[in-house]
Image (cartoon, coloured by chain):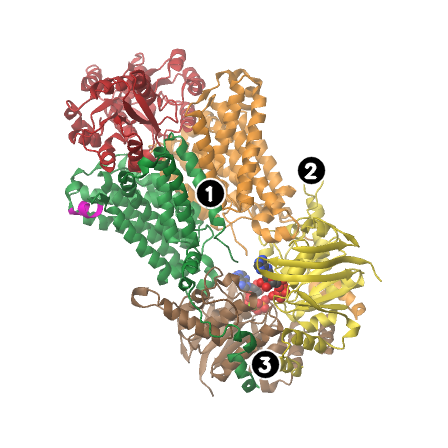
Chain colours: A green, B brown, C red, D orange, E yellow
């Protein structure tokens, strides 16, 4: 009997199959423009929002928006945000969230400042900061993952707790690192090249590497699967908890680098360092087109989201509106982006 | 006797106060199809989850090709050549077919970077093998867009990749139509013919009887019967046996219902 | 400006009393901003110095400048019945009034810092240490007008927490003074995040400068922004001296900025004294029965000519 | 055949059933103490956290914590938090979250302040504020529900947008309402009775009513079912979207009342009114034992959570620690509560 | 002829570009059991979701007791006496049995306050009726703690409450063991005996054949056959018919698989 059936296994629907004969499967991306658009519709949507927003601003005030300084000043601070937005895309894709990154930024950059102030090379400081970031990310991740806590609230708690520690020890004192400007580390990480702030190159490299990690690396593949269906992932032999902890560690690393870059911009560490990034960074991730339910996301979109959010304030002021309009536009852009992304984020179950 | 691929000895498992398994022995030889049957809650899924390393037994030993193993896990089970199609299919529905097929077993090269083209090729080959070319989807289709039967197909494709030694199918025909069921049967026979083993779980005893070489009946966490196909005359014998163990005193309603079912055939 | 500080220290009645003469007194002290806030930290250091010198037990309270929170904290402070409370005046007369009344009933001595609450002090007593906000702001405006050599019709930018009436009173004063002098003032509302990280304001200031190319002077609010001026100016492609930058407070960063020629004027409101003097006065009121102190700390301006005097103090977060 | 089977339907497992013969089902609560504990384990857990925390504070400084004034001062503003925490328990149970309540508080209390400043009766002001709250809740809810947006981000956006509107119109000016003290509304809502602030009675009434609404009313039953399994709920004829919008409206009402109470306590309306409540209120809900995944929750626990959070700052300072420790303890209490609730929040699927 | 409880006329439904139903007529009379069969994706679930008001048809008319209705919704469907046990059971697993039984139909008194005691009484009665007293759980047990069969029982208890005129069962025996299946059969016969109607959906054609008075076969969104039980000799006839419509040319593999299935009996 099984003999008689064998041909069917090879060709159980021979008749229907003929219709698609000769058609080989191709990656949608290889279908040219249409495939590219389909594959990247979330990030392209974000880009569209950004372009529309900039167009409105430009029409309001063409002269300012054709000045390079405007862009170069955004490019100075944007990298700091990018270094956290991108890892957060991983966290959100993994079905978690991390609100503790501001304190991690503060903590890691504190270590950096301490090392530099003690007279060591800033490179050593950066290494120490990244190590701190890894440790804190591991701590937060382990608490959430092995403690089985809701990451939204647990990381909020950790943010308070870590910031509290900084405050208790420092009693509010900031550190000025005026010597930093002459160090080679500063030249490499924070100077200008032909009027372009170098930090943006580092940030772009980070974004590109992360996007590849997200789309072309086992880590990204596993993050997506874990965020999509953790039960399946563990049934398929993926160590779900480890993957989850890893994304928190990744945020720790990103936050540490962000913290160091932030200190290098103006040679000062504040005990509040990082706090101001909580809401803009969060907003960037979601404005960028990563949905809240996990499993899918876009690194490029998140980066564009960060650019968009960075330009809101600047644009509002450059367009000649009073600063009171900034919050309003922040809200407006968030809502409009979410509405826009509704159309390209189908949620399957 | 054929090589023994895997053996479970005196496996016990309790969830809190619920005793799902109370000392089960089970083994699968190369090239045989073992049918695992039992009532709802008998512990079938729990047993195969232990086999596939997803659930850790409370006590008992696991032997792979005669050698006892420790630290049994889902990853190690797959490394040992055991693939499972779970009852809930274990698919990540927002991911592509490729990503589902290679879930937890990504084809990677240098430093964990994915071999994307290789994966696509392999996925295409697998899907063609189980007869999936007829549809308009590609290896990049999102699993969430597929129908139930098609999703089952992806799960099966994942299982047959890598020429696993033992494939476990937990109620693969549940909620499938005749056409789709026939496809699964195809596949099971195909695998047996190629000398690999299958552990088949099902509620439809006729289905199981049709396909298995050996039957294991689980009842409330214990093996109630292990028998070769040759020792059983017909599916009805099995059904009677199962009714008897379920309700030793005999349950008139049940007997009638089942009689009615048989009568209709 | 420095003379004011010395004067204050010399008023210590140290001769007549033991060290730690105030050690049985319990004081609640409102630092005002958030923990680690640049301004708040100097205030805190002043208060801590006073506590170390005089010996009272001081509870420090932070509010992040959230006025609703401040009122509740004051309510809890009154409930605990310390000997004295040093409160920030930001919530304003209406909100503080009932609690001041309660404190008065319970015999709690009150001091207010940073923002005056004239109606409250008139009704229930209490002293004030801090600049007369509006006046100080106006003075800064006038000084900037003079030193920057502005003319009627020139353009200037003023940044400040205008969203909060009492916190922004100084900056509003500066705006008013400049406007009265005929300057065209562009007001920019500072965002709360800038208190935590002034770098976040870089693009915005660049945008504002680009949008108003003729701007001659830029004024910054109290806090950390003035110290960040070199970064702002570099980002906007300006050189030291291109623009007359002025503002409030001092800090090591601001001293550096003076050194580099980026900043030309700051109105020192001597936050250190806003920490030290209220504690001193409360001790005097409780232990010695003296009447509350009223000190205008907004005495002087720091300019490129005299910034070196404050530089060492600034490094120790004393000014 | 069907005749023969009928007795079975009445008694298909006659033999087994005999074992439980005579045992009638009873509500677990009727099993006495044990049942009560089981039924209320989340809120009792929260209570335990609170008691332990207070015990620690009391040991640190017994005198302060035996003073009634301390409690009465906390009880003055606690109601403000309670009026938002309780509706938020409904929102979270319903599977959503609302971060726009601070702006709603600010907006509604602004309307209240305007009405009162214009010389109308404060009662009218409260009515107008509540109406505003309903409208804003409806607006936010409709946007989230009918727009199909993630409530976490959409409500964050709405919070920015509404606060921005307040700022744009007011340009930062606050309003002092000194005349309020002599109005009958003030007597009823904000005075003291034998040293107890009356607002706490209103808040307790609100909590009790809401708890009944949650446990003994169709609204609560539907909120829970919708949060648990929206698909089932709609299959069973529940208008899921309407229930969802309703919980946002409920938050709007709560926030409006909270805003009015806050203004009456301070005699002042600030354009930032409500902003300070975002994090403490959110923390209260989760410290109170309502999990993040929807379907279950506890109103009483949320209320106790609010009390706990209110006492952290007071307790830390009263215990003699510097204000720098407040953030640290905030984080610590959040993390410890989450860990504590882990044991009584089983999640079924 | 018995009273016609509900009638669907020329119902069409498309999901985007997918045509789930392309003009279906269906009616159910009082006291009859209609068996609805068809392959996976034939549109069975879509059809009954339209009946129960959960899904709105793209076009077509719905008549209740002969009168056309507009604004058909889940709530109105339940008001009209139609109760459905959905394929996915539609239970809120974190809630108690009581809350699930009265989901969307809470027993309320003054101003929407729940009649808690009444609900408990009724739930107890219902559970006793379908034979649930033997377990250690009470109406306050959380549904998430129940087994699959027990959950199905809760869904059925919900459906029989209020003496609905028509009860729709979408694959109620899927993933149920023999014992549990027998229970469901009990129940169906009981309902028919009490003069109410049932619409029964199942993949197991033997099951459907056994229980139904009339069969409706759906094929790719169209009614392929409507026939009385008396017109069909045996379940095999039905199976053959379905194979024919599925693969007009005839598919040897399928035929063999099904022959094998029959042979085994
Ligand atoms: N995660 C779990 N927690 C608690 N009890 C469980 C869990 N998983 C299974 N059980 C219980 O263990 C017993 C065996 O369940 P199992 O799923 O193995 O049965 P099964 O034979 O596969 O049933 P079915 O035929 O319905 O799939 C049941 O009583 C079940 O309720
Ligand atoms: N929400 C939906 N969105 C898009 N397509 C859908 C949706 N629901 C059903 N379909 C499609 O409509 C068709 C009919 O589905 P339906 O669930 O009614 O089939 P069925 O006969 O119940 O199948 P089964 O036996 O597998 O339950 C299928 O092609 C299915 O993919
Ligand atoms: Mg199973
Ligand atoms: Mg179906």
Query: Disc 2 marks which residue?
Result: E111
Q: In this rendered view, identify the residue nearer to me: C137 or E138.
A: C137
For ligand 1, give the image quadrant.
bottom right
Q: Could you classify mark 1 by the number of other residues whose Cα lies within 10 Å: few (under 14), some (14-19), or many (20 or more)? A: some
Subunit of label 1? A
Query: Vertical placement of D255 versus E7: above or below?
Result: above
Q: Is residue E243 left or right of C238 when viewed as pictured?
A: right
Subunit of label 2? E
Is B228 one of the magenta-colored residues?
A: no
Q: How would you classify the magenta stretch by its main secondary structure? A: helix
Which element is circle 3 on?
helix
Which element is circle 1 on?
helix
From the image, state whether disc 2 or disc 3 is nearer to you: 3
Subunit of label 3? E
Q: CA distance from mark 1 to mark 2?
A: 39 Å
Q: In this rendered view, identify the residue nearer to me: B122 or A317.
A: A317
Q: Could you classify mark 3 by the number of other residues whose Cα lies within 10 Å: few (under 14), some (14-19), or many (20 or more)? A: many
Q: Is residue A282 visible?
A: no
Query: Disc 1 marks which residue?
Result: A336
Give percent across and percent down for residue D91. Answer: 54, 42
Query: Disc 3 marks which residue?
Result: E253
Identify the residue at horizontal 50%, vertical 54% (top origin).
A346
From the image, state whether disc 1 or disc 3 is nearer to you: 1
Q: Is residue E234 left or right of D83 when viewed as pictured?
A: right
Outermost residue on the right side: it is: E1
Whether residues under marks 2 and 3 lie with C-beta atoms below 8 angstroms apart, the answer is: no
What is the span of residues highlighted in magenta in the rendered image? A184-189
Give percent across and percent down for residue A75. Answer: 28, 43
């Amino acid at each position: 009997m099984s003999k008689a059936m064998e041909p069917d296994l090879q060709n159980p629907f021979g008749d229907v199959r003929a219709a698609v004969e000769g058609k080989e499967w191709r990656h949608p991306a290889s279908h040219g423009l249409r495939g590219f658009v389909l594959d990247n519709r979330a990030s392209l949507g974000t880009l569209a929002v950004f372009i529309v927003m900039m167009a409105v601003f430009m029409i309001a005030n063409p002269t300012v928006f054709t000045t390079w300084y405007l862009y170069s000043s955004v490019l100075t601070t944007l990298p700091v945000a990018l270094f956290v937005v991108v890892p957060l895309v991983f966290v959100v894709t993994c079905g978690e969230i991390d609100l503790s990154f501001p304190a991690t930024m503060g903590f890691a950059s504190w270590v950096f400042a301490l090392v530099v102030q003690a007279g060591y090379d800033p490179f050593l400081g950066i290494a120490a900061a990244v190590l701190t970031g890894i440790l804190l990310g591991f701590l937060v991740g382990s608490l959430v993952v092995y403690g089985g806590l809701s990451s939204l609230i647990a990381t909020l708690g950790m943010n308070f707790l870590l910031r509290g520690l900084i405050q208790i020890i420092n009693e509010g004192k900031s550190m000025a690192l005026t010597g930093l400007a002459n160090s080679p580390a500063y030249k490499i990480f924070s100077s200008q090249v032909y009027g372009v702030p170098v930090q943006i190159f580092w940030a772009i490299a980070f974004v590109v590497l992360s996007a590849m990690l997200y789309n072309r690396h086992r880590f990204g593949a596993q993050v997506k699967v874990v965020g999509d269906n953790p039960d399946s992932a563990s049934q398929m032999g993926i160590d779900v908890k480890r993957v989850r902890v890893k994304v928190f560690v990744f945020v720790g690393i990103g936050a540490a680098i962000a913290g160091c870059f932030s200190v290098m911009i103006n040679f000062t560490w504040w005990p509040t360092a990082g706090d101001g990034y909580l809401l803009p960074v969060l907003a960037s991730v979601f404005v960028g087109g990563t949905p809240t339910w996990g499993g899918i996301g876009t690194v490029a979109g998140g980066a564009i989201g960060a650019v968009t959010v960075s330009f809101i304030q600047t644009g509002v002021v450059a367009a000649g509106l009073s600063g009171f309009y900034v919050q309003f536009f922040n809200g407006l852009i968030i809502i409009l982006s979410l509405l826009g992304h509704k159309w390209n984020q189908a949620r399957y179950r | 006797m054929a090589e023994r691929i895997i053996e479970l000895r005196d496996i016990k498992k309790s969830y809190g106060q619920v005793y799902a398994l109370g000392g089960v022995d089970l083994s699968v030889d190369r090239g045989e199809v073992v049918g695992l049957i039992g009532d709802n809650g008998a512990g079938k899924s729990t047993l195969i989850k232990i086999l596939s390393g997803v659930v850790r037994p409370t006590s008992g030993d696991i032997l792979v090709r005669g050698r006892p193993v420790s630290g049994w896990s889902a990853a190690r089970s797959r490394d040992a050549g055991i693939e499972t199609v779970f009852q809930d299919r274990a698919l990540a529905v927002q991911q592509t077919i490729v990503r589902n097929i290679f879930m937890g077993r990504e084809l990677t090269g240098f430093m964990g970077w994915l071999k994307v083209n290789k994966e696509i090729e392999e996925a295409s080959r697998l899907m063609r093998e189980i007869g999936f070319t007829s549809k308009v989807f590609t290896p990049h289709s999102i699993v969430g867009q597929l129908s139930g039967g098609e999703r089952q197909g992806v799960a099966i494709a994942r299982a047959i990749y890598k020429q696993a030694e033992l494939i476990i199918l937990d109620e693969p025909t549940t909620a499938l139509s005749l056409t789709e069921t026939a496809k699964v049967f195809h596949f099971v026979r195909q695998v047996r013919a190629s000398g690999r083993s299958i552990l088949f779980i099902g509620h439809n005893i006729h289905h199981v009887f049709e396909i298995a070489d050996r039957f294991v009946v689980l009842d409330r966490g214990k093996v109630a019967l292990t028998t070769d196909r040759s020792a059983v005359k017909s599916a009805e014998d099995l059904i009677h046996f199962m009714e008897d163990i379920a309700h030793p005193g005999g349950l008139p309603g049940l007997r009638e219902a089942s009689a009615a079912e048989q009568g209709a055939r | 400006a420095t003379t004011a500080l010395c004067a204050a220290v010399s008023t210590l009645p140290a001769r007549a009393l033991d060290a730690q003469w105030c050690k049985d007194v319990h004081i609640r002290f409102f630092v005002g901003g958030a923990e680690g806030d640049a301004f708040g930290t100097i205030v805190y250091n002043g208060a801590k110095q006073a506590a170390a010198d005089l010996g009272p037990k001081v509870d420090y309270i932070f509010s992040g400048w959230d006025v609703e929170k401040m009122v509740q904290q004051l309510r809890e402070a009154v409930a605990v019945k310390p000997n004295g409370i040093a409160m920030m005046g930001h919530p304003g007369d209406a909100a503080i009034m009932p609690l001041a009344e309660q404190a008065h009933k319970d015999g709690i001595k009150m001091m207010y810092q940073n923002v005056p609450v004239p109606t409250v002090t008139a009704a229930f007593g209490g002293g004030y240490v801090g600049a007369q906000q509006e006046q100080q702001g106006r003075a800064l405006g006038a000084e900037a007008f003079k030193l920057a050599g502005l003319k009627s019709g020139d353009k200037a930018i003023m940044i400040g927490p205008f969203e909060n009436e009492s916190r922004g009173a100084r900056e509003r004063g500066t705006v008013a003074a400049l406007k009265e002098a005929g300057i065209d003032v562009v007001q920019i509302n500072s965002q709360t995040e800038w208190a935590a990280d002034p770098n976040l304001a870089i693009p915005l200031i660049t945008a504002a400068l680009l949008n108003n190319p003729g701007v001659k002077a830029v004024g910054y609010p109290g806090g950390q922004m003035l110290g960040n001026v070199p970064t702002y100016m570099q980002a906007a492609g300006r050189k030291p001296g291109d623009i007359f930058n002025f503002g409030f407070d001092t800090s090591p960063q601001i001293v550096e900025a003076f050194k580099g020629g980026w900043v030309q004027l700051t109105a020192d409101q001597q936050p250190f004294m806003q920490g030290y003097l209220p504690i001193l006065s409360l001790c005097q009121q409780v232990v010695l029965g003296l009447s509350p102190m009223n000190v205008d700390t907004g005495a002087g301006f720091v300019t490129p000519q005299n910034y070196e005097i404050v530089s060492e103090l600034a490094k120790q977060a004393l000014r």
